[in-house]
Amino acid sequence: MDIQIIFESIINNWPVILLFFTVAILYASVGFGGGSSYLAILALTGIVFTQIRATALLCNIVVVSSNVFFFSLQKKINWKKILPLILCSIPFAYLGGYVKISQQFFFILLGSTLFFAASTMWFSKRIIASERKKTTSKKLKNIGFGSFIGFISGMVGIGGGIFLAPLLHLTNWDTPKKIAATASVFILVNSLAGLIGQYSSPDFYMDWNSTAVLLVTVFIGGQIGSRMRNTYYTPVQLKKATALLIAFVATRILWIAVS
């Protein structure tokens, strides 16, 4: 990596860097990686679309690694319940990342995915606040959840937590804090699997100079967000504000894709 090129990248892309820093703080504070928002931001920058997915996954990995570490220290990770989810999601996330898709299809899929993410985040107030008694988890259901979400996540370039967490809340899978921990683990393993799948593709490309800047940025933001969790603001307030941003960007992406 060239130091001068990295410095020029910081100067030329400071708005993107600032947005990534903010997203990392917001998402880390509720146990997510921020992949959907990274995709939304990068999709509007004009960089090669094959690089967008890999960059978002790398940023996901950096942010949620800290989340998993802190949740593990707090003993919020139920590995017995999580394993059926992640073991089935990993190969499907790899396949999704390996699948070659056209640029138009990618942006249509991305826009639709972001709309879904915005909707689940906007209507998540009742879900997050709920402390209802958890129901018994069925392995077959977990396998289905993990496989489907893993494949879509790998194809689009996100960890899948934005899909998984609302689904687990709606099915009363476990307590809110343990669902957040589960989402973090799910995002981490699927981001790794999806990234390996993309790296295996002959179309893989990465500008490591600009990507390095973003990785350092989200690492710092993620550390701040992990320590601010449930201290200065509520997850509901954060998610509603972020949902509005994602919905706006999703509209713009879909408009460009179909026009």
Image (spheres, grey):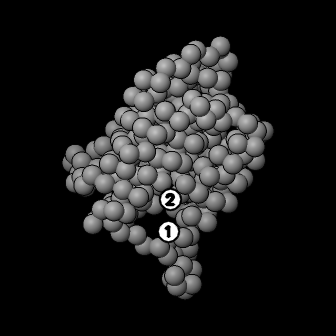
Question: Label 1, on which residue?
Answer: 211
Whether 108 is drawn above or below 149: the answer is: below
The secondary structure type at the circle numbered 2 is: helix
Sequence-wise first label, 1 or 2: 2
Residue 79 vs residue 169, the one in the foreground:
79
Task: State the SS at label 1.
Answer: helix
Q: Residue at point 49% right, 76% down?
A: 209
Q: Against 126, is 108 above or below?
A: below
Q: What residue type is labelled 2?
A: Leu
Give the residue at x 50% y 68%: 211
Residue 81 location (% of width, % of height): 57, 29
Q: Are marks 1 and 2 in contact (CB under 8 Å)?
A: yes
Q: Measured from the top left, where is residue 57 in percent x and y?
A: 47, 55
Q: Nearer the viewer, residue 188 or 210?
A: 188
Question: How many C-alpha atoms fall within 10 Å of the one at disc 1: few (<14), some, or many (≥20)?
Answer: some
Mark 2 crowd level (few <14, some 14–19, many ≥20, 10 Å Cα): many
Q: Where is residue 1 in the image (x, y as percent from the top left)?
A: 51, 82
Write down the residue under mark 2. Answer: 58
